[in-house]
Amino acid sequence: MSHRTAPRPARRRRARAAATAVTAVTALALTACAGPSVAGADGAATAGDEATAEAVDWSAVEPASEITWWSNHPGTSQEIEQELIDRFEEESGISVELVTAGANYDEVAQRFQAASQTDELPDVVIASDVWWFRYHLNDQILPLDDVLEFVEADADDFQPALYADYEYDDQHWAVPYARSTPLFYYNKDLWTAAGLPDRGPETWEELEAWDASVKPLVPAGGSTFGLSTGPSWGAWWFENMIWGQGGAYSDGFDLTLDSEESVAGGQFLHELFHEKGVATLSADDAMADFSSGLIASTIGSTGSLKGALDAASFEVGTAYLPDGPAGGGTPTGGTGLAIPSSKSPEEQLAAAMFLAFLTNTDNTAYFSQNTGYMPVRTSAVESDTMKAIYETTPQFRTAVDQLADKARIQDDVRVFVPGADALLNEAIEQIVIEGVDPATAFESVTPRIETAYTENVEPYL
């Protein structure tokens, strides 16, 4: 049982016999950095009506002959996704239209929300770590356990830490697809020239000590370590740093940004950029700056690995995220796939068949091989395909091992409270870009996160 289904007094979501309307996210709609509302234009949720409240006899359903999939093609995977679609169409006779619904997870989510009152909804949609729960709160996605069992998807074979991320109210609301953790990437050639060991730093303190050896070797305007920020990104990698100081965004849904440890996490980040000058902020994409050789190391998604290996003219090294004084760990992340609750049972069944196919042992290994995302099935981790990849490209192994050794479930506030991810990123950008005192930066976003929770989450728990 995941942490999300463990009993929490006054916090476990009440069981519902029918769909529940969700209040519009009015507080977040007033903020420039807020995500899209979880409600429809009339302020009511676009629920799946009574269809989601009643069990479907899937054996009496004939799957639809065609479905639509909205994706942002994570890890520049559009060609790979189309290849998997072609395989599915040949095997099943069901056609799948692949739609580029946005450049990133947030753009896909915005389009999905905008389409919620129309007949333009897809049959399968990308559902990232910070978006699936608001879809669920809004009754926009189907609980998958029953239909996955019917199509014999073998849900028990999903990597437990990844599948549990979508569990709430004793149901799973998405399946893992392009799943990742942040990785520490480093330029092996520069490391060698600087006389450093061929590994990532075990601690942030060690990286700071290595700065004097690395910095003279990077091009003008570069740095030993570089980062980029933005919604669905900044607050993800920063979890490692705040955890490393013993802090957290929240304890359950209780914000802990004002704790001494959490402020210490912000202070560490402040010093990394301002006092110590180890880090610089990329104008756009830190992975692009890393691949070009401008910065010697960075944090990037495991899904960026294939692109980095292809783009870099030097040997790319991968390592676990460094620890702080209190440890650290790596947050799970990336995206899953969900099925809209308002689609017909015929479309939902065809979509479930497609999800099972996309994430089966062979296909998740193939997707991992071509992107760098982690294989989402336990059976795929040590499959012949993945073993061959580990042998020729050992960088792929780092993410799989880090998941087993260092993965940590994300703080509830970031992934469950609508708009909180963007607000946390706002505080991080205040610290990094403007040099704002961390306590002040955290204090500036705290009331808005608390309002978002009180108005848009707490009534439905």
Image (cartoon, grey):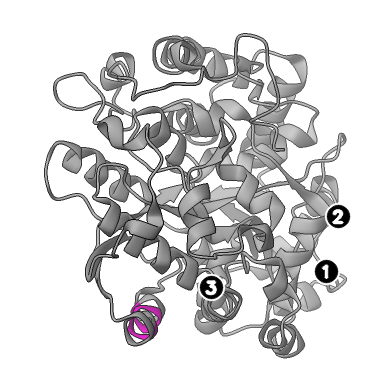
Amino acid of disc 3: Ser
Q: Which residues are magenta?
A: 82-87
Q: Nearer the viewer, residue 142 or 320?
A: 142
Percent x, y of residue 376? 62, 64
The residue sitting at 14% across, 36% down in the picture is 117
Image position of 211 (left or right of 348): right
Residue displayed at 55% across by 81% down: 366
| Element on which disc 3 rests | helix
Q: Which residue is mark 2?
A: 202
- Residue type at mark 2? Glu
Find residue 328 and report its image quarter: top right
Q: CA distance from mark 3 to mark 1?
A: 18 Å
Q: Which class describes the residues within 10 Å of circle 2: few (<14), some (14-19), or many (20+)?
A: some
Which residue is label 3 attached to? 291
Name which residue type carries label 1.
Arg
Do the residues under discs 2 and 1 have CB atoms within 8 angstroms?
yes
